[in-house]
Image (cartoon, rainbow, N blue to C red):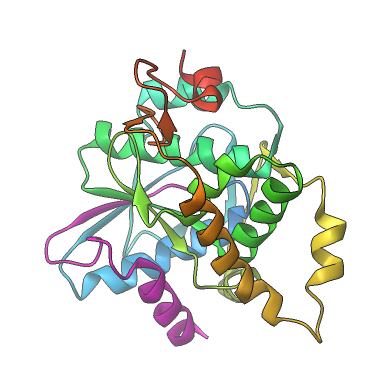
């Protein structure tokens, strides 16, 4: 299982500058799956050892690790989140609509990496979560969120990569359970149309989850892209605006 996951992680990060000699990486945990975030940090640490890189992770105040921290100590360095990021993270509501949450997490990860002085950040968001968030944005006719789900690496501070975009949620969740990782988050993703996703992606139609990525890419590229970007998440914004509407709520 670990070998399969490592291949999936490498596919997800292919095309980015994450895997190169001497790189420093921050794994920022995602509220979409706290145990998987810890397991992913360990995987990245194991992979990066062969590249001579250094991997860091943070535990924001809304994130609670109950079991498995000792498994990270040999491959990942746990550091304190920057105070500015902690203040912004503390403003997150307990339940946040999934597409919006991913945008906010990208901003938190990007700014954290910049303030900590590392080269890039990785956000452990699986292909399953990306597909579900894409469906939410599509049905809600809020297609600007497709940018967050399609862009390979972006951020207002350091670049952020979606590190599990080629891995299904159940695979990384299974690995986390087998390794003994247990964590929770005060902040939770909200899915309005989860029943629609469940109706579409069933055992006899798994290919819909795979085809959703091409749909997300098509819609994201069809959207008009501004030349200016949010200082936190890096999303396109009208020139003259410091933050997108979402990041404005926690950074200002």
Of 2 and 20, which appears nearest the observer? 20
Of 214 and 204, which appears nearest the observer? 214
Tell me, yes or no, if residue 186 can be seen here.
yes
First to last magenta residue range: 1-29
Q: Is residue 213 above or below residue 202?
A: above
Q: Is residue 144 above or below residue 212?
A: above
| Residue plotted at (52% across, 35% down) | 104
| Residue plotted at (22% across, 60% down) | 17
Of 184 and 115, which appears nearest the observer? 115
Q: Is residue 134 left or right of residue 159?
A: right
| Residue 162: x %, y % from top left | 44, 57
State yes or no: residue 45 in magenta. no
| Residue 55: x %, y % from top left | 28, 56
| Residue 35: x %, y % from top left | 60, 58
State yes or no: residue 28 in magenta. yes
| Residue 177: x %, y % from top left | 64, 71
Of 232 and 113, which appears nearest the observer? 232
Q: Is residue 163 above or below residue 191?
A: below
Q: Is residue 132 left or right of residue 161?
A: right
Q: Is residue 10 left or right of residue 99?
A: left
Q: Is residue 190 left or right of residue 34?
A: right
């Amino acid at each position: 299982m670990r070998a399969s996951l490592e291949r999936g992680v490498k596919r997800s990060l292919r095309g980015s500058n994450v895997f190169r000699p001497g790189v420093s990486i921050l794994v920022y945990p995602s509220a979409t799956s706290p145990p998987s975030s810890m397991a992913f940090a360990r995987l990245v640490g194991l992979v990066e050892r062969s590249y001579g890189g250094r991997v860091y992770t943070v535990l924001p105040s809304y994130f609670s690790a109950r079991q498995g921290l000792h498994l990270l100590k040999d491959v990942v360095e746990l550091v304190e989140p920057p105070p500015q990021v902690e203040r912004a993270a503390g403003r997150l509501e307990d339940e946040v609509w999934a597409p919006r949450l991913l945008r906010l997490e990208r901003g938190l990860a990007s700014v954290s990496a910049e303030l900590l002085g590392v080269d890039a950040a990785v956000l452990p968001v699986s292909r399953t979560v990306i597909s579900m968030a894409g469906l939410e944005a599509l049905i809600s006719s809020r297609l600007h969120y497709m940018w967050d789900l399609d862009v390979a690496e972006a951020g207002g501070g350091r670049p952020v990569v979606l590190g599990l975009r080629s891995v299904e949620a159940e695979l990384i969740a299974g690995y986390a359970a087998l390794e003994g990782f247990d964590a929770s988050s005060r902040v939770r993703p909200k899915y309005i149309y989860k029943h629609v996703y469940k109706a579409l992606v069933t055992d006899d139609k798994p290919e819909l989850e795979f085809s959703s990525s091409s749909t997300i890419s098509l819609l994201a590229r069809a959207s008009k892209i501004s030349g200016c970007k949010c200082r936190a998440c890096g999303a396109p914004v009208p020139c003259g605006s410091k933050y997108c509407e979402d990041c404005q709520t926690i950074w200002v």
